[in-house]
């Protein structure tokens, strides 16, 4: 049966990806990742995992189990680089410092 939100029939893009995240295929994969991790972060092992992170999107929509990793919030932000929420603050500090230097010239 084909429903209107079946991700397989949608054009590539954000809508398709979001539909995929609601699909039984993704739920099964996600469940397998949760089983593997036992609910603990697979990077630091010390905190409860909350997010399933893609190591790679090379096999998007047909991921292997090893393409995914169960992470806690902190490790997930690190995986996405730039320190997550701290990046915005860092930018502001740099801008303020530049403005300070300019005003002193
Ligand atoms: Zn962690
Ligand atoms: Zn991620």
Image: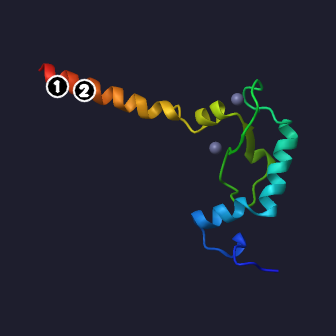
Residue at left offset 73%, top offset 30%: 43
- Regarding residue 69, the answer to whether it shows in the image is yes
Query: Which labelled disc corresponds to residue 102?
Result: 1
Residues at marks 2 and 1 touching, judged by CB atoms closer than 8 Å: yes
Left or right relative to 81: residue 17: right
Label 2, label 1: how many angstroms apart (C-alpha)?
6 Å
- Circle 2 Cα neighbour tier, 10 Å, few/some/many (<14 / 14–19 / ≥20): few
What is the quadrant of the N terminus in the image?
bottom right
Q: Reply above or below: 2 against 105.
A: below
| Pointer 2 residue | 98
- Is any atom of residue 82 visible in this view? no
Q: Which residue is drawn at 59% across and 35% down?
A: 77
Between 85 and 60, the residue placed more toward the observer is 85
Quarter of the C terminus within the rendering: top left
Query: 26 left or right of 99?
Result: right
Split into quadrants, the picture shows ligand 2 in the one at top right
Q: Which mark is residue 50?
A: none
User: In x, y percent, where is residue 79?
Assistant: 61, 36
The correct choice, above or below, for 41 with respect to 63 in the image is above
**SS of the residue under disc 1:** helix
Q: In which quarter of the image is residue 91?
A: top left
Nearer-the-camera pick, 54 or 22: 22
Pick out the residue farthest to the top: 104
Q: Where is residue 28 in the image (x, y as percent from the top left)?
A: 84, 56
How has the structure been colored for display?
A: rainbow
Q: Position of residue 58 (x, y in %)?
A: 66, 54
């Amino acid at each position: 049966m084909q429903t209107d939100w079946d991700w397989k029939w949608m054009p590539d893009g954000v809508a398709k990806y979001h539909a995929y995240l609601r699909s039984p295929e993704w739920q099964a994969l996600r469940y397998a990742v949760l089983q593997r991790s036992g609910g603990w972060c697979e990077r630091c092992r010390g905190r409860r995992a909350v997010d399933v992170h893609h190591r790679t999107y090379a096999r998007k929509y047909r991921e292997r189990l090893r393409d995914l990793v169960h992470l806690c919030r902190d490790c997930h932000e690190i995986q996405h680089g730039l320190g997550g929420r701290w990046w915005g603050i860092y930018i502001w500090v740099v801008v303020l410092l530049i403005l300070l230097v300019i005003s002193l010239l």
